[in-house]
Image (cartoon, rainbow, N blue to C red):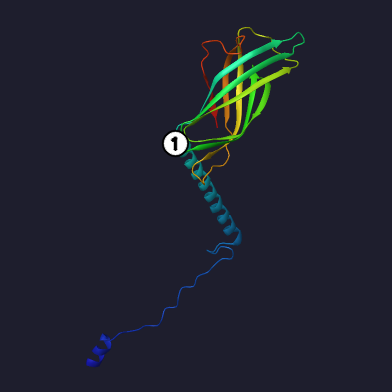
Amino acid sequence: MSDKQAHLNGAYYGPSIPPTKQYHRPGRGSGCGCGCCLLSLLFKLIITVVFIVGLAALIIWLIFRPINPIKFHVTDVSLTEFNLTSNNNLQYKLAVNITIRNPNKKIGVYYDRIEARAYYEGQRLDSNELTPFYQGHKNTSVLGTVFEEDLQDFNKEKPTGIYSIDVKLYLKIRFKLSKFVKTPKFKPKIKCDLKVPMSNSNGTAPAGYKATKCDLDF
């Protein structure tokens, strides 16, 4: 009886259970093929590039938008000639001074290219290339240009009194953030819608002419 009890109290080991077999179908393994890995890598690369570009755009926007924008005004204009001849040739002479104000304390501006164009009722009159320059912090600069030409086959009738003339600036600029940090080039456009009266005999605008604010478009 004691032998039987001892046998019952002892550990009992039955026959071992064979492991479950796993079957894999060809082409459906959990691994990733070469093509799949390339697509995954390309997708991650695109996401990274988009993120970096978006972050850079956000930083530039945060730097320049909330800070005082650069201001452009036409402070002086002189129209000493605007005659339409009998054969529809337009003879004109227009002098314009444009004031540029950079009100920022820590940002300078490189004007690498400045092209000034004059339009009358949508028709281009002339264009001038102005001298590039650097504008420092909290600085005011004045650009002067003269449009003078004998324009042939001008298809507008000569008005009387005040002339609607548009002056546009096409720029290539860079912003200087610090001594060693400069932004890539931007190409903003400046549009000044002018109502220009004929100047006095001494070449100055009539009394009462007010400075015209120009629109800045990035």
Percent coordinates x, y for residue 3 in the rendering: 25, 92
Q: Amino acid at mark 1?
A: Lys
Q: Residue at x 58, y 34 (%)?
A: 133
Up/down of 151 relative to 51, above or below: above
Q: Nearer the viewer, residue 107 or 216?
A: 107
Q: Which residue is mark 1?
A: 105
Q: Residue at x 41, y 81 (%)?
A: 16
Q: How many marks?
A: 1
The residue most toward the top is 160
The residue most toward the front is 202
Percent coordinates x, y for residue 61 in the rendering: 48, 38
Percent coordinates x, y for residue 142 in the rendering: 55, 26
Up/down of 161 relative to 60, above or below: above
**Residue 192 visible from this viewpoint:** yes
Q: Residue at x 66, y 26 (%)?
A: 128
Percent coordinates x, y for residue 17 in the rendering: 42, 78
Up/down of 174 relative to 13, above or below: above
Please identify the quadrant where the C terminus is shown.
top right
Residue 58 lies left or right of residue 116; in this view the side is: left
Q: Residue at x 68, y 15 (%)?
A: 92
Q: State which quadrant residue 90 falls in.
A: top right
Q: State which quadrant residue 86 falls in.
A: top right
Please identify the quadrant where the N terminus is shown.
bottom left
The residue most toward the left is 2
**Residue 1 visible from this viewpoint:** no
Q: Nearer the viewer, residue 187 or 4?
A: 187
Q: Nearer the viewer, residue 28 or 169?
A: 169
Residue 81 lies left or right of residue 100; in this view the side is: right
Q: State which quadrant residue 24 falls in.
A: bottom right
Give the class, few, some or many, for how many residues have Cα within 10 Å of label 1's Cα (few <14, many ≥20). Answer: few
Element at badge 1?
loop
